[in-house]
Amino acid sequence: MRKTAFTTTRLPTAWACCALVLLLGSVGTGCAKKSKGVDATGSGAPPASAEAETPDITAAPADGEAPAAAPAPTEAPAAAAGEGATEAAAPAPAPAQVSNAPLAPKKTVTKTVKPAHVPAPAAKRDVLAGIRQAGASPQKAVDLFLAAANVDPKFAAANYNAAIVYERMGKYSEAEAQYKAAMRANPAYFAAVENLANLYARQSKFSQAQQVLLDTIKVYPADLGLRNRLTSVWLAEGKVPAAEKEAKKILKADERNVGALLNLATVFFGRGQHELATTVLTRAREIDPNEARTWIQLGFVYLAQSKKTEAVEAFRKATELRDDLPEALNNLGALYVETHDYEAAIDALQRALALYPSFAKAYTNLGNAYKGNKQYEQAEIAYKKAASLAPDAHDVLYNLGVLHLDNKLPKVDRLERFDIAKKYLGDYLAKADPKGEDRKRVEAYMTEADRNKKAEGKRIASEKRRAERAAKKKAEADAKKKAEADAKKKAEEEAAKAAPGTPEEAKSPTPAEPAPGAAR
């Protein structure tokens, strides 16, 4: 049995949430073949703030926030009180399978503030209706949000929500335009600033992400949340010294700033300084034990230290604190696969995909879980879905090759499966271009596919000969049995014909003629 590749996703540190918003608040910032993929033990890669492998996440509403139908008490402003918006439960996470976006911390309702702008009633109604439609009818939701923006051009939440839904639909140009419109409507609408930077980072447009944050920081230099976001962008871009320096400056201004602590832990983790990373994360946990991102980063530290049990518990804790984190559920599922708890893995990964239907890495891990659970047809479906969502994620080609090499799938010809396996493995070599031992191993699998195909061909031929002999033997036995039955029947018929009359004749003898002269 070969070990397939599983993929963990690193949940970077603080970033803007992508939840739809309501009104009446202030925006806070605040020895087996193993499938190939991102090594859960890190392979040197940190759970960095904004790594290119991290999918975007949509945050759920904070404790105390209102559902979509009813505005809640407002939150404290981040720096300058901007147009308010209380988060609503988001219908689905953003669609991008690759994202550099860290997750925003949950916001805490602290006090009521007067909104900087009171939206027009008609605009407010359209936004509320759009939030309710966003899950089932995204385009209808966008139309409602844009209608609200047309009614009230200063209602930034309308443009912001339209941008979020566009982003989930994969319409990034439209999302960018609407985030900018929200920023024009209200320059202090930091959620739009952060999500726009997030959108740029997801597309590796780091200079643009940096610029949009710097421009806002110039106006609001005291906002530490924006500076944390900038630090995350620098980490994603590989500007580690600048990121470390900024994280330390933020901590000098606010030693209890969890976002800065998480960014600093990311720096230490990337250098392999796991003990330092653990110390910083422990401090973050002491400040806010309910911050899910801290537990996720601890999970990666534990993985790097080969503490899989502790890693599982850390990821499980993160999912208990926030059940809206696809990354955490994906990572938990990947580790369940590693420990051969395939049913638990399938459950966790299906939950991740319910939150984030375009999560390619979760589909890869789900394929591994199905494969381990001997549900090979479902495994193939999951792998193919991952490949369609992330064409550049070549490891899934390897996994498909291993799947067909090791297992006979329903409706797949016994010989053709080896050609399919070899094709996938060959595509993997051509696209991923592995080096050294990795290439040799895959080439050996391709050779094995040829060898197994020949062996299978011989088995099929042997089975055919045995079947033919069995059929011939059966036909001969059936013919002999029929001949015996026919002979017996014929003998019985001939015996019946040779008998001296029927029984009726024996019981009724011919009457004798009467004697002459006898009385009649």
Image: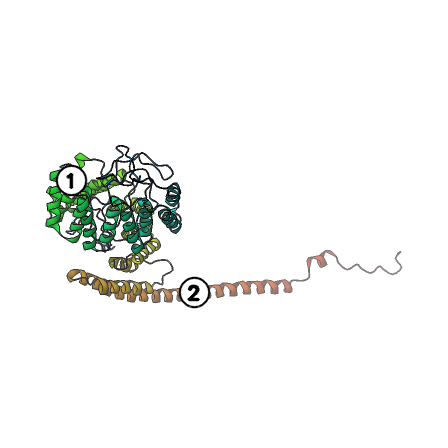
Question: At 35% from the left edge and 37% from the top edge, which residue is drawn?
Answer: 71
The quarter of the picture where residue 448 lies is bottom left
Q: Helix, strand, or loop for circle 2? A: helix
Q: Amino acid at mark 1?
A: Leu
Q: Is residue 43 left or right of residue 170?
A: left
For the C terminus, which image quadrant? bottom right
Residue 197, compared with residue 417, is above or below; it is: above
Mark 1 neighbour class, 10 Å CA radius: few under 14, some 14 to 19, many 20 or more: many
Question: Can you see residue 178?
Answer: yes
* Residue indicated by mark 2: 471
Q: Helix, strand, or loop for circle 1? A: helix
Task: Name the residue nearer the viewer: 290 or 45.
Answer: 290
Task: Name the residue nearer the viewer: 505 or 263.
Answer: 263
Residue that lies at the very extreme toward the top in this rendered image: 111
Q: Position of residue 35 (x, y in %)?
A: 24, 55
Mark 2 neighbour class, 10 Å CA radius: few under 14, some 14 to 19, many 20 or more: few
Tell me the distance, in whole angstroms, between the alpha carbons under discs 1 and 2: 72 Å
Q: Position of residue 203 (x, y in %)?
A: 24, 55
Q: Position of residue 255 (x, y in %)?
A: 13, 37
Q: Earlier in the sequence, mark 1 or mark 2?
A: 1
Which mark, by number, is residue 281? 1
Question: At 18% from the left edge and 60% from the top edge, which residue is drawn?
Answer: 438
